[in-house]
Image (cartoon, rainbow, N blue to C red):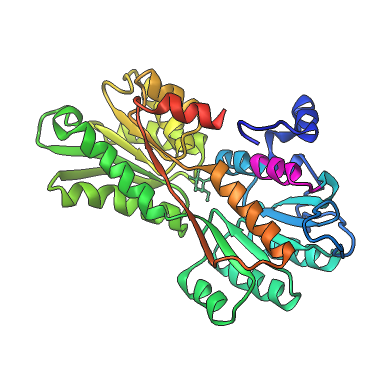
Amino acid sequence: MKKRIVSGFLAFALMLGLLTGCTKGTGTSNPESGSSAVGEASVSTDSSDMSTKKVGICLYEDNDIFMSKYCEELVEYLLANGFTSDNIKISDSYNNRYVQINQVKDYLTQGVDVLIINPVDADAARTITDLASEAQVPLVYVNREPDAVEEIRWEDYDLDVTYVGCDARQSGIYQGELLLDAGLETLDLNGNGSLEYYMIEGDQGNIDARYRTQYSVSVLENAGWSLNCLFDAVGNWNTDNAKQLVARALDEQPGVEVVICNNDAMALGAIDAITEHGLTPGKDVFVIGVDALEEALSKIEDGSMLGTVFNDFIAQSHAAADATMNFIKGVANEHYISCEYVKTTKENAQEILEIIK
Ligand code: GAL
């Protein structure tokens, strides 16, 4: 757990390099079923004793830098609260809703006390909610918010289902405000009075990607800025994809002043492409992201990245685990447990680094 304890399990896992991808730290992740046997759901007389409680976790995609950090923190916090590593099962859903639904079915057949699901998409969430409520297993969705229709269902039918995460609109608004704070006079490098930009999006249909793309730009439009989008493409949250996209854009659509990325992993790829193109990031082109990955924070400190928005995986994973423990103890949760993003620039990068280190 950040800034508190390093559990024996984590120290051991780190020693073996097991947690480079979160699913490698516990249980199996068979691509088909993705889960391993967890036995029957436990019956414990002491509701605060978590040592026999079983948690089934699905990640939409373990090969996602942010989610992998999130999951490490989640596991560490569960262990610190008395769960055992044998009873924490993690599956990589390989960004495939059918794989994820099968993993959930497996968990339910084998018996888990709570499910923690990072859903592949809204359709997967609908089916997973049905499966979990039929089996009377409480469900905590994390990071990827199911849609409004789904959330109303939890309320209407009083289901033991909650979502823990941030409002993606806020991250988009903060990205826009970071650019506003930097000022058009600084960013408008060619002095034509408008901002030439590239947009590198997460994945299609994802709510974070949609809102970040929409709100980062609308904040600037509402402030009266003139904008010129030279290039807009989907990088699927991934560094290498973003690097290739930006390299292509720099060849085909030169004259960019700002690259707005839906996350830091892609911002780091954009910075690499800019550098390899012979330009200096932070001087010839400005780059912003979301997440506050450690590497992004050091780029902000050395001036090659303009800013980011801290996506607090520590608060979110702890809140998800707390909600899990509430369900186990028979305490109800709100259906929506929110958290706040934090605007991050050179001024507070060190402070954020201290929090996540
Ligand atoms: C976002 C995060 C991205 C990526 C995405 C996956 O919250 O900023 O880096 O992990 O979730 O859905």
Residue 196 image position (x, y, % from top left): 21, 38
Drawn side of residue 284 relative to residue 184, left or right = right
Residue occupying the point 16% across, 34% down: 184
The reply to whether residue 131 is visible in this rendering is yes
Residue occupying the point 28% across, 34% down: 258
The residue at the far right in this view is: 39
Which one is in front, 55 or 224?
A: 55
Drawn side of residue 222 relative to residue 197, left or right = left
The reply to whether residue 124 is visible in this rendering is no
Q: Main secondary structure of the magenta part?
A: helix
Quarter residue 43 falls in: bottom right
In this rendering, is residue 208 above or below 182? Answer: below
Which one is in front, 193 or 133?
A: 133
Residue occupying the point 18% across, 50% down: 221
Q: Which residues are magenta?
A: 72-83
Quarter residue 122 falls in: bottom right
Drawn side of residue 142 relative to residue 325, left or right = left
Residue 149 image position (x, y, % from top left): 48, 75
